[in-house]
Each structure stands twice: as C-alpha cells, then as structure tokens.
Amino acid sequence: MGLFDFFKKGNKSPNKEKKVKSEQKNVLNDALLHALQSSDWRVRKSAVEKLTDQITLNNIAKNDSAHQVYQAAIEKVLNQNVLADIAINSNDSNRRYCAVLRITDQKILANVAVNSKDEDALIEVVKKIEDKSLLENIARNNEYYRVRAEAVMKLDNQSLLSYIAENDTDSYPRKEAVKKITDQEVLYRIAKNDKDKFVRKAATDRLTSQKHLSEIAQNDKDYGVRLQAVVNKNMKDQTVLEHIVKNDKKGQVRMAAADKIADASIAQIGYIYAAQYDDEWIMRQIAVKKVTDQEVIKSILKNETENSVRVIAIGQLSDKNLAKKLYIEIAKNDREREPYAKMMLSKLGELSVFSTPYELCKTIDRLSTGEEGINILLNYMDRVNSWEKKDRGYYFYLLARNSKNIGCKAASYAFYAADIANRPESTTFGWNVLKSAGILPATTKPSPEIAKKLHEKYPIPKTIQKIKNYQLPK
C-alpha cells in the first residue's frame, strides 16, 4: 500500500479512522527511518528536520558523519546531559562546538568547563557561565590562554585581576586584566615593567597620574607606548610635552605632543620634524598639512620622494603659481595621483591639464561634492558660455545636484532649468526633477522652447550666498 493511499476519500467509522491514522504514522516513521539510512547526507538531513524522536536524534547527533546532518540533529536535542556528553567526549571538534552552543544549564556548563579539553568550545562555555568563583578558577588555572582571557573579561575581583595582570604567562590575559584594573600603582608597575608592549600600552591608557604618564612618555623604548602616554587625556604637562616635541626620535610622537602644546611656535617644531623625518609616509602626509613655514614646505617638496606627501605639501604653498607648476608636473607624470592633482588645479582655475571642459567637470564631479564642489564650479561661471552646450549642461547639472545636497532646493531647480536649456533632449535628468517638484506639469513634453522659457524665468545664482538665499520667482 502506498503512503498516499491512506488519504483516499470515503466514509470511515471512528475506529477505522483511528486505525488509518496509526497506520499512516507507522508508514511515515518507516519512511523517515529509511531516509536516515541513505548515503546522501541531504536526504538524511531532510529526515532529521522532520524527526521528533529524541532517542534517534541523540544517536544521530553523536554518530552521523556529515556535519550538516549532526548539526541539524543537535539543534533538536533536548537533553542537556546528552549535549554535555558530546561536548566533552566527541572526537569531532565541530560536533563538540555545536553541542556547547546548545547548552544552557549552569551546572552542566560547569561540568563541561571542568572536563572539556576543547579550547574553542571552552571559550563559548565561559561566555555563558555566571558562577564568579568558577570563572575566577578558570582565569587563574585553565591551560589555554584564550580561555583564561575570556574568563578575565567577566571578572571584577580587583585583587585577582591585579594578580593575573602581573603574573599570567601570556600577554593576552594580562592585557584583558589591565583593562579592568583601577589601582593606579598596579597600572604604573605594569606600564613600566611588562615585557609586552601591548600590555604596557593598555596600562598606560588607564593611567591618570601626570608624573607616571610623563615618565612613560619620555622613557618607554616602544614608540607606541610613548604615543599612548602622550595622547592620554590626563597628559597635560607643557614642559614635558615641549621636551617630547623637541627630542623624541619618532615623528608621530612629536606630532601628537605638538597637538597638545599651547605655544604654536613650539608645536611647529614637532610638525616640521614629523613632516621631514617620520619613516611612515602617511604620518609625513598628516604632519605636512600642519606646517606653516613656507621655506620648510619648499624644502620638503625638494627632498620628499613620495608624491602622496608632495601633493599635500603643494597645497600648503602660498605661492599659487608655483603650486600650479608642481601640480601640473604630477598630473603629467604620476598616473595614480593625477586625479588629485587635477582636482587641485581645478580649484586654482588652471585649465591647461584638461583636454575638454567635460574632463574638468568629470574631475570635479568625482573628487569634490557639496559646498566645496559648488565653490570650485563657480570659479568657472564666467567661462561657461564659451563651452559646447552639452558641457554647459553637465556643468549646471553638477551645480544643481550639489546645491540640492546642501539643502538649497530652490537654487537646484534654477540650475536644472539651465541644464535642460542646454541639453533639451527628453533623456536629460532635469526634466524628471522639475516635473516631480511641480515646476513643470507632469504631462509636459520636453522641447527646446519650454526649456528656454523656464531658464529665462529662473535666473541662475552665481555666488554661494545667492545659492543659499535663492527663492523661485512667482
């Protein structure tokens, strides 16, 4: 008899219906059991998803070879002791891990914590444990440093945290303990004496004593730790900061100290050193933005080999003709930095590097948005009439979009009107915008005549202030 024969219509007595349902259940169970014997894990997994018998699920969770199948079974196992048995005794690390994720009983979690030798599973167990004494024992004694560190993250016992921070054999638990310690003397000892720079750095970050911070900032052998002392919000001693600005061997540390110096002339010493001598070009790039001495900037431009630094230094020049000359050199010779150099040249009103007005607009479109983009575009307002109409349209489109982006919708409509006046074809985006805004009726058919009249009705604003104050004519 087929499985679906039981569903044939007909009048049945209550006893007969009960018998049919029982037979149907047996057939379904037989079908599931048959599926569980399949060599195809997909078939077995599908059967597991329909299975409710806990004994069978327990057996599959412990013994099926396919992780997709046993994971599906573990998700349906209800007995926490069965899950613990898998978590502790299975030879399959993934099976152990999946079982741990399903354990919620605190006593059983404690049992797994004591008996498991699986590091990854233990980390998940520790995340769930609420017993502070057990967590303290794990933090002090577990053989795996990652497990100890996980337990430390849940502790608040200052005495034990201090002990771990100064005595654990691995830097990870020590660092996690340091993050929770409040005792300043303990933190100072660690910041001064720990052999691992990252632990010292973590301790330095929590120091509040000006004296302790000053000592670390001037004497630690690792620049990252010194830097941490300098940027600590409690580091305010101007004398010490000045000493660091003038003497630290690392430009980044000098620059950080310069940022906190009240005397601008002293701060410049730190910025200049970092801009000239830091061994990381990104730090030199950041520093050169803060250098004001024009002769120093010219010296940097003469000696700096990294164009990423040079393009920023050029922007610091007060001599705009020299700046143009240097940007043009980079635009011609450095393909990677050509777009940035051209963008800066567009700000300076230099068109010689752009083959067409379209290229100019494309450069501005790509690298400058909002009010900055508007200001650059406005520099070319008096030249636009000499451009081809399609380039003028693109130019006004950029002004429209950037005006909208800074909240100047009225001005954006005037620029969209200028766009369609130059590009009146129906595919021009401005038509849709003006219709959506109610400036034009939704049924308007695009034409050069309508575009021209609208452009004449809405004169374009030619300064940033007029853009911000623009009101549509009635």
Image: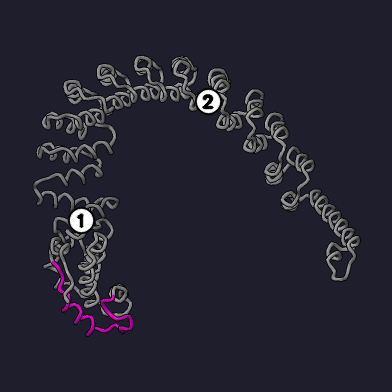
- As for residue 448 lying within the magenta part, the answer is yes
The percent coordinates of residue 275 (x first, y second) are 20, 35
User: Which residue matches tag 1?
Assistant: 372
Residue at point 28%, 39% (across, down): 282
Q: Nearer the viewer, mark 2 or mark 1?
A: 2
The percent coordinates of residue 327 (x first, y second) are 18, 51
In the displayed structure image, the side of residue 30 where residue 202 appears, left or right? left
Q: Is residue 31 above or below residue 474?
A: above
- Residue closer to the observer: 176 or 224: 176
Q: Which mark is residue 250?
A: none
Quadrant housing residue 441: bottom left
Label 2 crowd bin: few (<14), some (14–19), many (20+), radius 10 Å: many
- Residue closer to the observer: 224 or 203: 203
User: Which residue matches tag 2?
Assistant: 151
In the displayed structure image, the side of residue 13 where residue 164 appears, left or right? left
Q: What range is drawn magenta here?
A: 438-461
Residue at point 35%, 18% (across, down): 191
- As for residue 217 lying within the magenta part, the answer is no
